[in-house]
C-alpha cells in the first residue's frame, strides 16, 4: 500500500479493485469443475421452490460476507475456540439465514469436484442465481475467490450498515468499501425482495413522520410496542418475492419499511436516483448488476491465500 500512498483515495480504490478483478475470472472453473455453476443453480432453484423468501436470504449472505473483510466466506464460519465468528454479530444474530442451503449446495459441488470450488464463490453465484430465479436480471459472476481461515465478530458489528442509519451514514458505510452513493442506492434495491423483523422497524412505525399513516397502521398490527420482535413484514409491500423496481416506488409513496430505506427518498441527494429507478426498471437492473459485481470484487483471497474449505462452516483440519 505504501507505493500507492501518493494517489488520491478514489484512485487507490480503482487500483485495488482493478487488481482484484484481474485475478478473478468468469471462466475460472470451466476446466477444473465444469459442472460447478449448474450444480449451484440446481440447489438455488430447489431452495426457492421450497421457500420463495430464501432467495433474499441467500442474496443477503453475499452482501454480509463481502462487507466484512472482503468476499471470503467468513460469514459462514461457526465459532471456534480460537475465534468468535460473525454469525452472532448484532446485524446477523437471529437474522441471517440460509446456512443450511449453502451446506447442501456445497455438498453437491464437492460430490462432482471435491476441493475445487470455494464457499466464497458459492455465495457470489447463489446471489446471482437467486435474483434471476425471482425475475431479476442476470450478470456474469467473476470467480476464483478462496476462503478465509478466520472470522471477526467485531468487524461484522463495525462494518455492516445498520437499519437505523441516516443517508450520510449509509453513504459513508458504502464509501468505506469503495462504493459510490449511486452504487449504494442501486444495491439497496435488493430490498425489493425479502422480509425484515419487527425489531428493525418498530421505532420507525411508531415514532417517524415520513411514513404513510395507513402503512404504519397496518404494520403496527403485527408489530406491537413491546412484543413480537421477531414478527416479519415484507421490505417491498407490492411484490416481496419478485426482483423488480417496486421497492423504489414504495419509497416515493413513503412506504419504506426500514428507517434506512426511507432515507433514500427523504428530500436528500438520493431522491433523484430513486425517482429514476422507480420509472425505469431496466436502468435499475443494469446498475444493480454492475454494483454487485463491483461489491463481489472486494478484497478476495486469491492464489495461495486462504483455502478451499471442504465444509463451509469450519476451517479445514
Image (cartoon, rainbow, N blue to C red):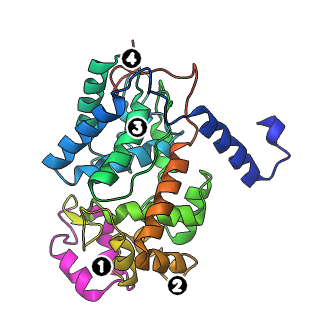
Q: Earlier in the sequence, mark 4 or mark 3?
A: 3
CB within 8 Å, label 1 to label 3? no
CB within 8 Å, label 1 to label 2? no
* Residue 5 visible in this rendered orientation of the protein: yes
Q: Earlier in the sequence, mark 2 or mark 3?
A: 3
The residue that mark 1 highlights is 206
Side of 188 relative to 112 (left or right): right
Number of residues whose C-alpha sits closer than 10 Å to that of mark 4, classed few (under 14), some (14–19) or many (20 or more)? some
The residue that mark 3 highlights is 75
Q: Earlier in the sequence, mark 1 or mark 3?
A: 3
The residue that mark 4 highlights is 115
Identify the residue at the far right of this view: 6
Which is more foreground, mark 1 or mark 2?
A: 2
Segment colored magenta: 199-228
In the rendering, at what x and y percent does residue 210 appear?
39, 84
Which is more foreground, mark 2 or mark 4?
A: 4
CB within 8 Å, label 2 to label 3? no
**Residues at marks 1 and 3, CA–CA distance in whole angstroms:** 33 Å
Q: Which is more toward the observer, 193 or 293?
A: 293
Q: Earlier in the sequence, mark 1 or mark 2?
A: 1
Q: Earlier in the sequence, mark 2 or mark 4?
A: 4
Q: Which is more toward the observer, 207 or 178?
A: 178
**Residues at marks 4 and 3, CA–CA distance in whole angstroms:** 19 Å
CB within 8 Å, label 2 to label 4? no
* Residue 95 visible in this rendered orientation of the protein: no
**Residues at marks 1 and 4, CA–CA distance in whole angstroms:** 51 Å
Q: Earlier in the sequence, mark 1 or mark 4?
A: 4
**Residues at marks 2 and 4, CA–CA distance in whole angstroms:** 51 Å
In the rendering, at what x and y percent does residue 159 appear?
51, 49
Amino acid at each position: 500500500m505504501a507505493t500507492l500512498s501518493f494517489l488520491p483515495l478514489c484512485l487507490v480504490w480503482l487500483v485495488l479493485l482493478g487488481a482484484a478483478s484481474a485475478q478473478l475470472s468468469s471462466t475460472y472453473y470451466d476446466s477444473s469443475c465444469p459442472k460447478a455453476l449448474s450444480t449451484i443453480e440446481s440447489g438455488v432453484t430447489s431452495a426457492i421452490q421450497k421457500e420463495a423468501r430464501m432467495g433474499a436470504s441467500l442474496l443477503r449472505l453475499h452482501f454480509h460476507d463481502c462487507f466484512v473483510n472482503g468476499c471470503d466466506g467468513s460469514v459462514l464460519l461457526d465459532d471456534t475456540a480460537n475465534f468468535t465468528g460473525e454469525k452472532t454479530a448484532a446485524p446477523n444474530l437471529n437474522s441471517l439465514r440460509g446456512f443450511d442451503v449453502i451446506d447442501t449446495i456445497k455438498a453437491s459441488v464437492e460430490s462432482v469436484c471435491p476441493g475445487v470450488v470455494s464457499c466464497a464463490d458459492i455465495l457470489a453465484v447463489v446471489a446471482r442465481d437467486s435474483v434471476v430465479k425471482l425475475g431479476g436480471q442476470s450478470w456474469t459472476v467473476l470467480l476464483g475467490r478462496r476462503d478465509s481461515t478466520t472470522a471477526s465478530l467485531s468487524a461484522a458489528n463495525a462494518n455492516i450498515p445498520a437499519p437505523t442509519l441516516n443517508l450520510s451514514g449509509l453513504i459513508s458505510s458504502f464509501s468505506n468499501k469503495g462504493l459510490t452513493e449511486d452504487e449504494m442506492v442501486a444495491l439497496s434495491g435488493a430490498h425489493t425482495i425479502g422480509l425484515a423483523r419487527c425489531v428493525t422497524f418498530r421505532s420507525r412505525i411508531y415514532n417517524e413522520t415520513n411514513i404513510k399513516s395507513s402503512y404504519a397502521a397496518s404494520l403496527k398490527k403485527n408489530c406491537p410496542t413491546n412484543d413480537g420482535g421477531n414478527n416479519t413484514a415484507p421490505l417491498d409491500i407490492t411484490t416481496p418475492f419478485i426482483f423488480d423496481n417496486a421497492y423504489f416506488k414504495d419509497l416515493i409513496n413513503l412506504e419504506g419499511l426500514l428507517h434506512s430505506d426511507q432515507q433514500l427518498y427523504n428530500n436528500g441527494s438520493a431522491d433523484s436516483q430513486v425517482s429514476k429507478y422507480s420509472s425505469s426498471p431496466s436502468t435499475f437492473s443494469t446498475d444493480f448488476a454492475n454494483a454487485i459485481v463491483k461489491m463481489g470484487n472486494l478484497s478476495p483471497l486469491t492464489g495461495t491465500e486462504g483455502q478451499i474449505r471442504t465444509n463451509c462452516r469450519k476451517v479445514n483440519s
